Amino acid sequence: SLESSLSLSLSRSLSLWAQSLHAWGKIFVMAAEKWVYMVTAQTPTNIAVIKYWGKRDEVRILPVNDSISVTLDPDHLCTVTTVAVSPSFDRDRMWLNGKEISLSGSRYQNCLREIRGRAGDVEDKEKGVKIDKKDWEKLHLHIASHNNFPTAAGLASSAAGFACLVFSLAKLMNVDEDASHLSAIARQGSGSACRSLFGGFVKWEMGSKDDGSDSIAVQLADEKHWNDLVIIIAVVSSRQKETSSTSGMRESVETSLLLQHRAKEVVPKRTLQMEEAIKNRDFASFTQLSCADSNQFHAVCLDTSPPIFYMNDTSHRIISLVEKWNRSEGTPQVAYTFDAGPNAVLIARNRKVAVQLLQGLLYYFPPKSDTDMKSYVVGDNSILKEAGLDGANSVENLQPPPEIKDNIGSQDQKGEVSYFICTKPGRGPVVLPDQTQALLDPETGLPK
Ligand code: DP6
């Protein structure tokens, strides 16, 4: 009857009203609370030796092929991120390298939504913090992120950045998922970020499901597995603004036939061979595969319409130098790989080779006259001493590498390389428990 349905709807509204009063009461109590609860984490960057180039799904960020990377030592290249939650925050906010940025982009929103959906209960008795799983939907976050390398260097910062965002939020929100599951969330921030959830040698499996749940990163071997490798990055100066990876790969997918062939025929075999090479620490195969894959990726860029040029003359000169040296030694000593920019990432088979490599590089690419060597070779610069390059005039005294008889370009390339970074394969993400390393103030939750 009308009467009973009226009373039913009245009691329904009453109970809804009571429920919302309860919820509001809770928010009110929370707002009266002062606490700021936070977590700080550090995450490495990575360099692909089998490249990711091309998406089959632009929104979920699903690739057209598998890729394999080496994680770089976070002591030299990393992102540190502090994430904080407090009932006193009125909206989600983020600061990148000290500057506030917008979180409205879909990549940030997708990561935040995915991680909030997996949040658990959190309790810190000492601080008087008690957060219920379902409270995370209402609570707001402050995020501060910092790269320990200059963004201007053109080194991929989005990989370490999104990996660190997802990893630190997972810790803050007590998300009970393993690194591979977290990698599928970081992937939605930036494809290459999924590989930064692990140390050592990592494969991003492209997966086949439409929802992307099987497009995840897995660790092939940890950083100790092959620890005599030394990595030298030449940060090559460039005037031109490069095409972003995101738009570059979209144009390649739309226009390059070579990309289709690469994804279908080349990478599947190469990935298996690379896994074997890593497992057996087979440096000759590792080098052959890395160099070939880097060159094919840049060939795909040239095959794109209009063509995309990421490497420049300096990059090409470095390739010739390494190719000549490897050939003259009879067996490969150094692998090279280039991402979406002119910087060379050189992987030497051991420390002794790295010392010779650095001497050769500094012979061809000496610093400008007034440059301090310690700012020209950064990261693990103890290598300078081993190379006898820590004294004054030491670069001027370098001899041309004997095997390179013909002229790659004489010793007059001053300024072509901005600086070198010496590093090695490194560990995966870690929480930094030391409060002094936090980027947000523990009282206000604002950048320090
Ligand atoms: C050349 O991961 O930066 O470095 O997924 O659009 O964010 P989005 O692209 P991004 O692309 C990286 C491309 C690459 C190769 C690689 O890292 O595998």
Image (spheres, rainbow, N blue to C red):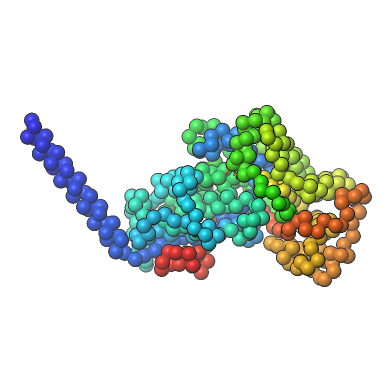
Give residue 117's position: percent from left, percent from top. Answer: 40, 46
Give residue 307's position: percent from left, percent from top. Answer: 70, 36
Residue at 31% in and 64% down: 33
Residue 54 visible in the snapshot: no
Residue 427 lies in quadrant: bottom right
Picture mark count:
0
Ligand 1 is found in which quarter of the picture? top right
Residue 306 visible in the snapshot: yes
Residue at 48% in and 64% down: 447
Residue 395 lies in quadrant: bottom right
Give residue 159's position: percent from left, percent from top. Answer: 58, 49
Give residue 133's position: percent from left, percent from top. Answer: 35, 51
Q: Is residue 413 left or right of residue 179?
A: right
Residue at 81% in and 66% down: 369
Residue at 57% in and 57% down: 79
| Quarter containing the N terminus | top left
Q: Is residue 29 left or right of residue 226?
A: left
